[in-house]
Image (spheres, helix red, strand yellow):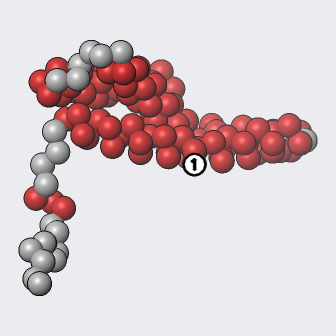
Amino acid sequence: MKKQRPVNLDLTTIKLPSAGKASILHRVTGVAMFFALIFVIWAWATSVSSADGFALVKDIMQGAFGYVIALGTLSALSYHFIGGVRHVVMDMGHWEELKSGNTSANVAIGLWIVVTITLGVVLW
């Protein structure tokens, strides 16, 4: 018996709708927040350990690396929150159709981009 299945699936040919991209992005930002939490816990533990530790964390956070970490963490948190609110609304029975689901996904992604740019300007 010969199975008719793809042997080498080219993932670049698959076109996901906006709702699928928003769902994957929600999962990715959840993982990103987990890894950002590792840095946050380290920075907190180091900063409260001694005056030198506080100075070290302060120097790191005032540099470019600290800006990228802070903006990345806040960006992931903001999308995860926006996507979470979208999922809660969908759980209540709204935006479940294909058109409204894609529209809400596009709005969530657009709002996330605006929030991230605003955070970048404020943190700068």
For label 1, the residue is: 35
Residue in view at x 10 percent, y 83 percent: 2
2 to 91, vertically: above or below? below
Residue 14, position in %: x, y?
13, 54
Residue sitting at 90 percent across and 41 percent down? 50
Q: Quadrant of the N terminus?
A: bottom left
Neighbor class of circle 1 (other Cα within 10 Å; few <14, some 14-19, many 20+) is few
- The location of residue 20, given as percent across then percent down, is 24, 40
Count of numbered labels shown in the rendering: 1
Q: Is residue 76 left or right of residue 83?
A: right
Q: Is residue 73 above or below residue 92?
A: below
Q: Residue at x 36, y 15 (%)?
A: 92
Quadrant hosting residue 5: bottom left
Asked whether the viewer can see residue 77, the reply is yes
Residue for point 30% across, 16% down: 93
Residue that protrudes farthest toward the front in the picture: 1
Does any portion of residue 121 appear in the rendered image? no
Secondary structure category for the residue under label 1: helix
Q: Position of residue 24 (x, y in %)?
A: 33, 43
Question: Mark 1: which amino acid?
Answer: Phe
Q: Is residue 102 left or right of residue 25?
A: left
Image quadrant in which you'd find residue 62: top right
Quarter of the image holding residue 117?
A: top left
Of residues 14 and 60, the one nearer the viewer is 14
